[in-house]
Amino acid sequence: MHPVRCKCGTVRGQLEGTGIHNRLICYCTDCRAFARFLGKAPDVLDEQGGTEILQVAQSRLHIRQGEDRLAAIRLSDKGMVRWYASCCGTPIGNTMDNPKMSFIGLIHSCLDQAQMNEDFGTNVAVVNTDTALGNPKPKQRGLLGVAARFMWIVVTSRISGRYRMSPLFNGAGLPQVEPKILPAEELANLKSAL
């Protein structure tokens, strides 16, 4: 079991079992905007604006404490649901708004960095490098494998019915908390910040 917790310790949980996962660094502007929205860019982003993410099936995530402190935003009305701890602003992870797409991309800052290599290996894909900050840009690698494992996570969760075991969505298929949708102007400001 791998611990999941916010920085102040109010929200705590764990990843149970083993299974297919993706470990990757994403350089997209949306991941960067999320870190900036929370005021956590120095804790979350690398020097070129990348966020390390661990994609797993939502059914493996168990929140044991602080569920009432989970909050969520969407960068647009069609965007991903981006979960965080309202107590200290620690980013938790990203999901689609449809629980049948039952994966979560956990942000490294809520995971135990000392156990990452042991629990999830050292193979880290690098994606969306065209929007990385600075030059030279990081070299993209592992995208095909990420896509294949992502599909496996989603399809097996759907076929087995485990998608219904998400701690983030209720029985009606709605997020446990209503995500705030960022105004377009605020999002543009977050994306343009250096």
Image (cartoon, helix red, strand yellow):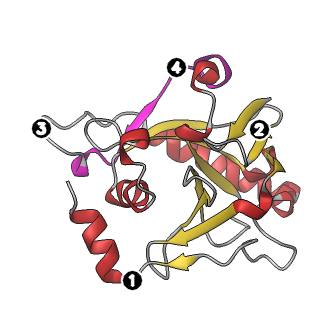
Q: Amino acid at mark 1?
A: Pro
Label 3 vs 4, first from the N-terminus = 4
Assign the N terminus to one quadrant of the image. Answer: top right
At 82% across and 36% down in the image, what residue appears?
16
Disc 3 designates what residue?
A: 135
Q: In front: 48, or 88? A: 88
Q: In this view, which residue lies farthest toward the left?
A: 135
Q: Give SS at disc 1.
A: loop
Q: Is residue 143 magenta?
A: no
Of circles 1 and 3, the one toward us is 1
Label 1 vs 3, first from the N-terminus = 3
Disc 1 designates what residue?
A: 183
Q: Amino acid at mark 3?
A: Asn
Q: CA distance from mark 2 to mark 1?
A: 33 Å
C-beta proximity under 8 Å, tags 1 and 3: no
Of circles 2 and 1, the one toward us is 1
Disc 4 designates what residue?
A: 122
What residue range appears in magenta?
Answer: 117-131
